Image: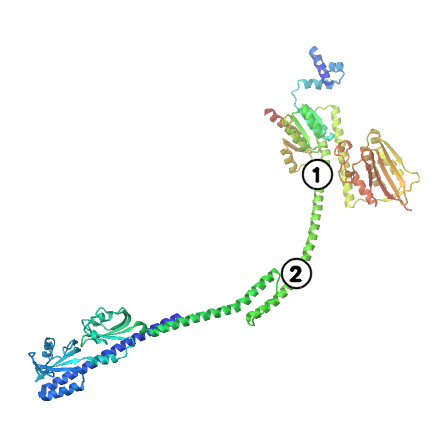
Amino acid sequence: MNKNIDDKIVELIKKNENISNKEISRIIGIPEKEVEMRIRGYSDSREKIMIVDDEMATLLPLKRSLEAQGYIVIEAYDGYQAIEKSKTEVPELIVLDLMLPGIDGFEVCAQLKKDEITGKIPVIMLTAKDEVRDKVEGLEMGADDYVTKPFNLNELKARIKNILKRSRES
Amino acid sequence: MVYVSYEHSQAAIHNSVNTNLLVATENTGKAIDNWMDARKDDIRIISAIAENSEEEKFRKYLSSFQNEHEGVYQEFFIIDPDGKIIFSTLNNPSNVLKESFLKDALEGRLFISDVSLSNTTNLPEVVITNPIRKNDTITGIMGARVSIENLYMIIEGIDIGRSGEIFLVNNKGELIFHKDRFRILHENIKNNFAVKEVIYEKNGVGDYINYKGENVLGSYYWLPLYRWGLVVEQNRDEAYADMMTLEKETATISIFAVFCVVLVAIVISKRITEPIESLKNGAAGLVKGNFKPISVTSKNEIGELTEIFNQTAEELLEIRKKLETKIELANKDLEVKNKELILANEELKKLDSLKSDFLSLVSHELKTPLSAIRTSAEFLDSEETMEPDIRKEMLKNVISNVDRLTRLINDILDLSKIEAGKMEFHYEKVNVEEIAKVAIENIRYLALKNNIAVSMEIPEDLSPVLADRDKLIIVLNNLLGNALKFTYNGGRVILSAIEEKDDIEIRVEDTGMGIDKDKVSKIFDKFYQADSTSRRKTGGSGLGLTISRGIIRAHGSEICVESEPQKGSSFYFKLKKYET
């Protein structure tokens, strides 16, 4: 279904290079904003970040902030979802909350690192737990960074940028 | 000591033996001297007489003199200065060697010849000559052949012991006296040690092996006048017989003494060590705890010591028994206390881990909304141009999380008060129906949203209860809230009350997902969520049930739970009727 929409948009643009998003929106019957997002996604060199958190209240502002920075943001609300989505979407980075329903962040991280594809994705752990023991465990599981709640948004963004830069270079 | 005294005695005996022998030898020597002196005197007198007597008279005198000294004087003779015999008491004068004495006599000296065997009797003899003077002129030489058998008899008369042997030797080492007369002048014993010594004109005494190969003690004495050596030999064994006896006796005494000492030592040491040994064994037994009194065998100090030891040991054993009993009791006590301590420690560990879990949970619960607020606010702050929708979304997020935090903090404060017993309760007459209506009103919006039917089943004439009105509303709100959270869309929640004899039973029932049996006991724990996924869906603080239980307990009652998974749960409690 989604694929079809993308195909249609591509076709429309092929016919008329100067077609406006508003027109496409009207023709296909989806909001103009979605058209804009989809078009951006085609030639998208933008980096994809997955946020894993069961607390919508935490996830939402982070998602909005990262989107405003030009990242594509995927959401996951528990561990299973996180593992599944990281396999299909293969994000460039994962921001992983530790206190998750089902399997916790440590376990998710361990499973991701075991997989050939997802094993290379950098992980930033995000948690309210700030005991050294937790940090050590997190880093041992293969996390690339560790940020405690409440975090400074700018700091987190800087860390994300750094890690992405590093992983691009390697 | 024995050895030292033996040594001394031996030396003393040795000395005395030697001295005796020396004395005997000297005595013999003196006897020889005396006898020879007498002979010399005889000759001198006879010489003097010869000067002044007529021949006939002289012969008579000599004859009587010979008779007087029976056997001594074999012959008297006179020789003229030319060496011719001019007078002899024998008809055939013997042929004496004139050359040997002529010179001495002519120079006016008395001469004594070597011992030689007489050519008439073949017995040993000496020739003594003395000059005959007339007006200081030597007119002749008076000579006498002297048999020395008499001298021999004198020598033999001297006691020199049974095995003693006396020799006289001349300066050539030839025997000139021996008890065995046949050996005289027939034997040279110059290789005998003492003979060798004596012909070197030495006097002395010494142990040596004699010419017969015997161990002897020999004494030798040089007689210079006659150039004779006197040797007295005594068998060593005999000479030292006393010493040997002493040696034997000493040895015997020594051995006996040693034996006695050893025996005495053994006896004494037995008498000393046996009691000590038994004391030692007793002490060892005492240490091991199987002490038996030691029998007292002696009345000396050790016996007394043993008695004292026995007494002490008995006292010690008694003390030991007492101590052992005490220790046993103390050990049992310790064991019990130890077990208690282990249990207490386990409890503490559990508490500690609970506390740490609790802290972790509180930390998480507080930080999550705080984090949301911060991120939202920061985001709002950072973006200059922001779509109004997103701005509104962020502001809403801030407000809702501030509310959530406020609720949580209030809940924690309430709980702390309840736990500390500091929450104030105002008990009054409360109409259950009235507060039930308030509680239901509070959750009506949520119920509608989730499409859950909430009903109230309370008899109109229900008696009022004695309760804190506001707190009771909190309890009902918590129970109803939980019921809504865990009930599927289209489900039912019933708030009911029943009048009993003294109490009113209030019940909140739902047709929700129910609670697993193993989790029922935990749902009242702080922050406990029966399903870990439930928080996101339900959004509770996790303290509602804990607080509710605290409130109902403050009312002297308890919240009970009946639940069946997938069918529903029922929470109920009883309150006292209000008495007028």
Using the image, name the chain to which the residue with label 2 belongs: B
- Picture coordinates of residue A159 (x, y %)? 64, 29
Instruction: Specify the farthest residue to the bottom.
Output: B57
Density class for disc 2 (Cα within 10 Å; few <14, some 14-19, many ≥20) is: few
Q: Spatial distance from mark 2 to mark 1, Cα to Cα?
A: 52 Å
| Residue shown at 17% from the left, 86% from the top | B67
Mark 1 residue type? Ser
Which mark is nearer the camera, 2 or 1?
2
Residue bearing the label numbered 1: B360
| Image location of residue B287, percent across then percent down | 60, 61
Q: Can residue B431 be seen in this view?
A: no
Q: Who's the residue at 63% across and 65% down the image?
A: B314
Q: Can residue B56 be seen in this view?
A: yes
Q: Is mark 1 on a helix, strand or loop?
A: helix
The outermost residue toward the left is B82
At label 2, which amino acid type do we have? Leu
Residue at image location 25% in from the left, 77% down from the top = B26
Placement of B351 over or under B106, stated as above or below: above
Q: Which mark is residue A58?
A: none
Name which of mark 2 and mark 1 comes first in the sequence. Answer: 2
Q: Mark 2 points at which residue?
A: B323
Residue sitting at x 77%, y 44%:
B419
**Both labels 2 and 1 in a single chain:** yes
The answer to whether residue B563 is left or right of residue B151 is right
